Each structure stands twice: as C-alpha cells, then as structure tokens.
Amino acid sequence: MKDLTQGSIVGHISIMAPQIFAGMIMIMLCQLIDLYFVSYLGDAAIAGVGAAGNAGFLINALTQVLSVGTVALIAHAVGRKDRADANLVFNQSLGLAAASGKVTLVAGCWLARHYMSSIAADAAVVEAGTTYLLWFMPALALQFAMLVMASALRGTGIVRPTMIVQTVTVIINIVLAPVLISGWVTGRPLGVAGAGLASSIAVVIGVVMMAIYFHRAEHYVAINRDLWSPQIVQWKRIIRIGLPAGGEMAIVFVSMAVIYYALRDFGAAAQAGFGIGARLLGVVHMPAISIAFAAGAIAGQNFGAGHNERVRETFWSVLGLGTAVMVAFTVFAQWRPELWLGGFTQDPQTIAIGALFLRMISLNLVAQGLIFVCSSMFQGLGNTKPALLSSAARLVTYSLPLIWLSAMPGFRIEYVWYLSIATTTMQAGLSLLLLRLEFRKRLVPLLQ
C-alpha cells in the first residue's frame, strides 16, 4: 500500500501515470495488433473487426461498474486507514466479477450476430465481425476479474504489477496473432477467428498472473473466497458509485454504434477507415486518461482522509498536465495522419476517410482531456452521477441529430465530425460546471 495523502501530488502523478499509461497502451496495442494482421484480409475483415471491437465498449461499461466502485471505495478506506473494509470491498467485487463474466460470455455469444447485423449492411462485414466476437468473447468476460484486481491495486496506490502483467499479455498477443491469423509456423490460418483467439489466450494468462501476484506478494488486500458470498449492502456500495461510470461507457458504445450506423451507406471502406482511426485516437487518449486515472486514486485517498485542499490541488495539477499533453497530440494529429494509417491499409479511400477523421476529431482532444479529468475527480469523490449526466447530455445532442442528418439527402461524412466537435465542447463545459458544484457541496462543509 502507498499512502497518497502525504508528499507531492505532482510527484505521485509523475510516478503513477507513466506506469498506468504503459499498462493501458499495452491493452490498446492488442487491438491494433489484431487490426494490423487482419488488414491483409481486406476491408470487410477490417470493418468487421473494428465494428465488433466496439462491443468492447459495452463490456467496458459493465466492467467499469466494478472497477470504479472498487477503486473509489478502497481508496477511501485506505485514506481512513481501514484495511478490513478495503479487503471486504475487494473480495465482494471479485465475487461480482466472477458472476458478471459468466453472464457476459453466454449473452455475448448469443447476441454477437444480432449486434453485427444491426450496424453493418455488408454480409461479409457481418460474418467477419461475428466470427471475431465469438472468439474474442472469453477475453471480454475475463476483463471483469482483471480490472477488479488492477483497480484494487490502484486504490492502494500500487500500479507497477498491473503494468507488468499487461505488458506480458501484449507480448503474448503479438506472438500469437500472426501465428493464428496468418498461419505463420502452423500453416493453418484462422483469419479473424485467430485474432480473437490470440487475445483470449493472452488475457487468460494475464488473469492467472494477477491471481498469483495477489496470492504471493500482495498483503494489504488479499483474495479470500470466504468473502465472495453476496452481501447486498456491499454490492449497493460498489454499484452506487460504479453504475453511473458504467453508464458513461455504455453511452460511448451507443455513440460509436450510431456512427457506424450513419456510415453504413458509405460502404465497408468508410467503416474500415473510421474503425482504424478510432483505435489510433484511442492510443492518443491514453496519456491523458492515465494522468486522470492517477488523479482518481490520489483524490480518493485524500477525500477519505479529509484532506480537502489536496483534493483541489489534485484537480488543478492534473488539469494542467492533461491539457499540455492533449495540445501536443492535437498538433501531432494534424501532421500527416495518412502516415499513421498506412500501416493498417493500403486502400486510398480507407486512408482518406481515416485521415479526415483524425484531423477533425483531434480538435476535440483538449475538451476530451478535461472530460477525463472531471470524470476521475467525480470517481475520487465517490459520486459519479454528474459524469453520467454530462455524457447523457452529449448522447442526446449528438446521436439524435446524427441519425436525422444521415437520413437527409446530401449527407456527408464531415457532418459526423462537425457535430462531434460541437457536442464534445458542450460536454466539457457541463462537466466543469458540475465538478465545481460538487466541490462546493462535498469539500467546503468539511472545512467548517
């Protein structure tokens, strides 16, 4: 356990954020590796895997319920020096993770084709996406346990073990992807099924490694099956904080699905270009998200300890760092985005659409960074409802007009990104306002 209520806040961020970033970038690289090797199978395969990968946002929404609830409650317990409560929260979250993983595996396999059919008009895209999802589903189901263990460590101020495990899983995926997708060495190419299988095998190994770490090295919180039996009061605590955060991710899933729906009439190349561009943009987001994640744990421990001024200091420090990072990446994304896309496809139309997406959406980066910071601060304060409110406002102002515009004559792809820029800026302003109100309500009374 690392005490984040003492010492330099910027110092804590500078230690935690790079390690969180390294772990997160490893996860994102897994998805890019899949796309890289699948790209040799054609636009239908790229579009199918990209659209199927969007289902990961929905699963992430569910995992966020446990992840956010776990990190917030454990951070608060650590700040109060209440080890027993931290251990109880951790094991109750693991019990929920086991049940959620089983439900996800069954439901995902059952609904995979229905989901793909709803967002893709091309039969080849539907088939590729469905095949990928069926083999990728075990990886998504195991994410519940993986993220709960990682969140428990982050709540106690420890991030290095998670980074190491995620790095190992990516290396495994890098080795297995070409073997299973293209049939290197084996001579038996599995295509998109191999991409999903490689990721699933890597995640299985990662979960086993995390469990071994908790058994042998971690002592502040420990796996105890006797504490897995459902305790409704504890479930309510976890879900109360985590559910709004899960709702945020569910909204991202719906928004992405709406974009795929709006692009359906532009063909597989349009969906493929957006799919590649969206994953590359996800990599760009990682540094700011990593800084924000560190802020959530730091703010949580200090809020639990009653150190309100350090909570405020955490916000301003993270906002400055996150904004600087996003400005740098905005400039970088405006410079020859075609070069980024060339490693995944050689189709001129796909590259053109992906480059247009990156150039225009990169104008959102500073606003998105602010949204990430506010969201993590809400998590640290133990109230994620305001973050859900701002995300819901964007969903309404973005998705409904986009669906209407996509049905109008003369609809152009650029309209999708223009609308995104406007509504993301609006969401950033709303998030900042709601956080200011939350600070007044939850911090000021403690100083009186």
Image (spheres, grey):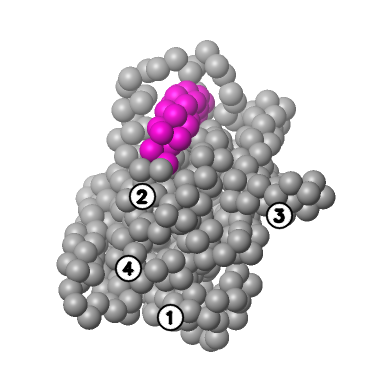
The residue sitting at the bottom extreme is: 335
State the extent of the magenta-drawn residues as a range: 87-112
Disc 2 element: helix
Alpha carbon distance from label 2 to label 1 = 26 Å
Q: Residue at x 33, y 30 (%)?
A: 237
Residue 414, above or below 24: below
Pointer 2: what residue? 117
The image's mark for residue 356 is: 1
Q: Residue at x 34, y 64 (%)?
A: 264
Alpha carbon distance from label 3 to label 2 = 26 Å
Q: Along the polypeptide, which appears first: circle 2 or circle 4?
A: 2
The image's mark for residue 265 is: 4
* Amino acid type at image mark 2: Ser
Where residue 440 sits: x, y (%)? 23, 55
Provide the major secondary structure of the magenta segment: helix
Residue 242 vs residue 208, the one in the foreground: 208
Give yes or no for contact between labels 1 and 3 (Cβ–Cβ under 8 Å).
no
The image's mark for residue 374 is: none
Pointer 3: what residue? 182
Query: In the image, is 220 to the left or to the right of 275?
Result: right
Q: Residue at x 47, y 46 (%)?
A: 130
Where residue 7 sits: x, y (%)? 56, 54
Alpha carbon distance from label 3 to label 4 = 30 Å
Crowdedness near tag 3: few (<14), some (14–19) or many (≥20) residues, C-alpha within 10 Å = many
The residue sitting at the right extreme is: 185
Q: Along the polypeptide, which appears first: circle 2 or circle 1?
A: 2
* Amino acid type at image mark 4: Asp
Q: Residue at x 24, y 59 (%)?
A: 395
Q: Along the polypeptide, which appears first: circle 3 or circle 2?
A: 2
